[in-house]
Image (cartoon, rainbow, N blue to C red):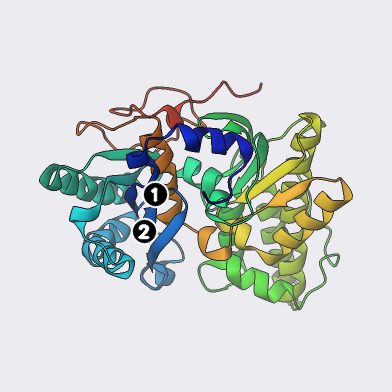
């Protein structure tokens, strides 16, 4: 048996042999990456193929939903074929399909969802719709070193900046969320303000290494002493005003200093709120996930601050931080372990039930369950 935390070992032992060694194809198409992965036994990743659309959307400075849908339509078949080929399997070998049902761009989601439904109908393979955020929350379990339940999870991406209490793989409580811009969205918008190439996050991270993070005192939005919510719109506006004022005076803007100072403001708030959530709930483990989790400064500061507070930090490898189908396949494995399936009448959704309680059309998965958010 591969190494698993104690609570997961009990679940693993309860699985039938057929479920335990399931071969699952995961499909992800929630935004601007078309991805497919093959996972065996809920732990062994046989392939993980990702087709990025950055080159398509870069001229527009952001994701264009219609272009994203068209590119998913063009890429879904070759990406899935590549994932199967790299894994050395065929559709006939699969035991289950897992596909992102939401949240995300509905047009993009429907490409992956429809493709999975078609395979399921033709081949008679059961499929489940997976919540994209849940995929991120479980992504560290694809690594050798894994967290134990319960843990606090910080998911920071282009669409989400949220803190969760993950009690087990089916019970998730939202502790905090963004009130406006998500962290990744703020990186991209600030990148645009500075005239940087899209996406702004990686470019800002690189330039920040050359700058002084204390050069400019950009504001931190704490939103009250007990709040675990995030707000980055004010920070973004502060950067815009700083740049505009210098341009009005014909003064040069030190781009690396702006990048470093902006990044430090985001990182400080993300890290301190996640660790505050852990301490206030008496939990000694924090998981970092989502696309922004690939930011080297965020990873470094969270590790340092966590060590100072005797809190263990877990984060997936860089390729599992950004949108990928491996995490979708993993979440699907635990759907099937709970005997969950998804009906053909299911539809894509743009709002996650993890963040926004309410029924999800056609979804029967227990992993869509969550306890009420804290006030």
Residue at x 64%, y 42% (from the top left corner)? 153
Residue that mark 2 sits on: 37
How many numbered marks, from 0 up? 2
At which x and y percent is residue 369? 47, 26
Residue at mark 1? 329
Residue at mark 1 to residue at mark 2: CA–CA distance: 7 Å
Q: If you read the primary sequence from the N terminus, does the residue marked by circle 1 or circle 2 appear first?
A: 2
Q: In which quadrant of the rendered view does residue 149 lie?
A: top right
Q: Is residue 99 above or below residue 186?
A: above
- Residue at 20% from the left image edge and 43% from the top image edge: 125
| Quadrant occupied by the C terminus | top right
x and y percentages locating residue 187 in the rendered image: 61, 60
Task: For residue 103, say whether it is visible.
Answer: no
In this image, 151 relative to 76: left or right? right
**Front residue of 353 and 247:** 353
Q: Residue furthest right?
A: 308
SS under mark 1: helix
State whether residue 188 appears in this view.
yes
Instruction: Residue 9 in the image: state x and y as whole percent.
Output: 55, 38
CB under 8 Å between discs 1 and 2: yes
């Amino acid at each position: 048996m591969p190494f698993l935390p104690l609570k997961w070992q009990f679940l693993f032992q309860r699985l039938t042999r057929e479920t335990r060694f399931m071969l699952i194809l995961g499909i992800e198409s929630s935004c601007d990456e078309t991805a497919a992965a093959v996972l065996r036994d809920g732990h062994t990743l046989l392939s993980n193929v990702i087709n990025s659309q950055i080159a398509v959307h870069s001229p527009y400075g952001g994701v264009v939903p219609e272009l994203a849908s068209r590119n998913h339509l063009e890429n879904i078949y070759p990406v899935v074929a590549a994932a199967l080929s790299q894994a050395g399997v065929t559709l006939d070998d699969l035991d289950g399909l897992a596909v992102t049902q939401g949240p995300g761009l509905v047009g993009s989601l429907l490409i992956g969802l429809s493709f999975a439904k078609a395979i399921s109908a033709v081949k008679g393979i059961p499929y489940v719709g997976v919540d994209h955020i849940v995929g991120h929350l479980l992504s560290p379990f694809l690594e050798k070193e894994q967290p134990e339940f319960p843990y606090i999870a910080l998911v920071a991406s282009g669409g989400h900046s949220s803190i969760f209490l993950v009690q087990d793989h089916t019970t998730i409580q939202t502790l905090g969320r963004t009130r406006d811009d998500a962290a990744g969205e703020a990186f991209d918008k600030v990148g645009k303000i500075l005239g940087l190439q899209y996406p702004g996050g990686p470019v800002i991270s690189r330039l920040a290494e050359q700058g002084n993070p204390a050069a400019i005192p950009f504001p931190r939005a704490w939103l009250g002493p007990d709040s675990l919510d995030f707000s980055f719109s004010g920070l973004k506006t502060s950067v815009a005003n700083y740049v505009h004022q210098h341009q009005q005076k014909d003064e040069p803007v030190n781009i690396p200093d702006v990048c470093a100072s902006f990044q430090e403001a985001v990182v400080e708030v993300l890290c301190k709120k996640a660790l505050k959530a852990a301490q206030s709930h008496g939990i000694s483990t924090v998981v970092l996930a989502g696309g922004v989790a690939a930011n080297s400064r965020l990873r470094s500061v969270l590790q340092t601050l966590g060590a100072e507070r005797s809190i263990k930090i877990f984060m997936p490898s860089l390729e599992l931080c950004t949108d990928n189908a491996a995490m979708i396949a993993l979440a699907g494995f635990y759907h099937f372990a709970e005997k969950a399936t998804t009906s053909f009448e299911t539809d894509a959704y743009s709002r996650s039930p993890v963040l926004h309680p309410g029924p999800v059309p056609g979804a029967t998965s227990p992993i869509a369950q969550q306890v009420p958010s804290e006030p």
